[in-house]
Image: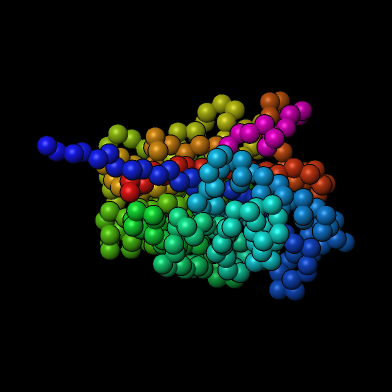
Amino acid sequence: LFCFLQAQTKSLRIISYNVENLFDCKDDSLKNDTEFLPDGAYHWTPYKFKQKLENISKVITTVGEWETPVLVGLIEVENQNTLVHLTKYASLKQKKYRYMHKESPDRRGIDVALLYQHTNFKPIKTAFYEVIFPQNARSKTRDILYTAGILPNGDTLHVFVNHFPSRYGGQKKSEPKRIYTAEFLKSKTDSIFLQSPYANIIIMGDFNDYPPDNSLTLSLQAKMPSDSIQKTSLYNLAYPYHNKANIGSHKYKSNWGMLDHIIVSGNLLLETNTVYIKDKKMYICQEPFLLEDDTKHFGKKPFRTHIGKIYHGGYSDHLPVFIDIIIQQ
C-alpha cells in the first residue's frame, strides 16, 4: 500500500503601491520638501498627514482581504519617520509590519520602501543600489531597494522595489535615464541568475514607462507572459493590461495606462516550481473607494490626495497592483 499525501500550499499576497507623496510635516534641510510643510504650497498639516496614513492603511488592509499581505512595496515615501508612523501609530500597526528603507539621493526626498511580515519573509540580504548616470552624475534619482528573504517553505525570494526617473520634460528627453536605470537593474538580475539559474525574482514599482517601452522591453528585457517560459527570462505581468480600454494603474487625461508593473522570473510562472504565481497574473485593485467620477474626461479616475496643489482628501493618483504567490510546504 502506498499513501499519497497532498502537498500543503500557502498563498501569500504581494502589493506594489505608489502612495503619492507620503511626506511628514517636518522640514528636512537636506531635501527640497518645503512644499509639504504647514506653510508650504500644499499646506501639509499634521491632520492631513494622519489622514494620509489612515488611507494607506485602509488600502493595504483592503487589498489583503482576509490575509495580511506578506510584502508591500511603497513608492513615494519621504523618510523613515513616515514609515514609523504608518507601522506603529496608524491603524496598520495591528498588522505588525517591519520595514526596509534608506534615504536616497533624490532631491525631493521621495524614496521607495518595503513593508514585510517577518513570520512569512525572513530577510537574509538587503541592499540599496544608487543609480549614477554616466552622462550626468549630478542628476539624482531614487535608489533601487533589493532584498532576498526566506519563505515559509525554505525557498529564497529576491525582491526589487523601484521608482524609475519621471517623465518630467517629456518622454523623449527623459527616456535615456529610464533606459540606463533599466540596464543597471538588468545587470543585478543577471548576477543573480549567474549564481542561481532557478532564482525566484520579483521586480515591482512605478517605472514611469508603459510595458512596450524601450526601458522595459529592450533594456530590462521583460517579455509578455506566454506559454513558452524560460526560467532565466523576465516576464512583465502588467503587459496583458496594456491598451485595454478603461483599465490601468494610472490615468493621464482621458487615457488609462500601466506605469506600475510586477515583473517576475520565468521560474515563478511554472506551477511545477515550489513557489509560483497564482494564475500567472497580476491584478489591479479597483475598489470603488479608490476611484471617483471623471467629470472632465468621463468614466472614472483615481481618487487623489491632491489635485494640483489643492487638497482633495483621497488616496493616490495610482492604483495598487498585486500578485499572489503559492508556496508548497
**Is residue 164 something that shows in the picture?**
no
Where is 131 relative to 168, above or below?
A: below
The x, y position of residue 246, in whole percent, is 60, 28
The x, y position of residue 78, in whole percent, is 67, 62
The x, y position of residue 168, in whole percent, is 64, 52
What is the image's colouring?
A: rainbow
Q: Quadrant of residue 297?
A: top right
Identity of the residue drawn at 51% across and 56% down: 117
Identity of the residue drawn at 47% across and 68% down: 127
User: Which span is picked out in magenta?
Assistant: 285-296
**Is residue 59 something that shows in the picture?**
yes
Q: Is residue 320 left or right of residue 2?
A: right
Q: Outermost residue toward the left? A: 1
Identity of the residue drawn at 18% across and 39% down: 3
Residue 287 inside the magenta-drawn segment: yes
Residue situated in front as seen by the camera: 1 or 322? 1
Q: Is residue 203 left or right of residue 41?
A: left
Q: Is residue 309 left or right of residue 67?
A: right
Q: Is residue 118 left or right of residue 266?
A: right
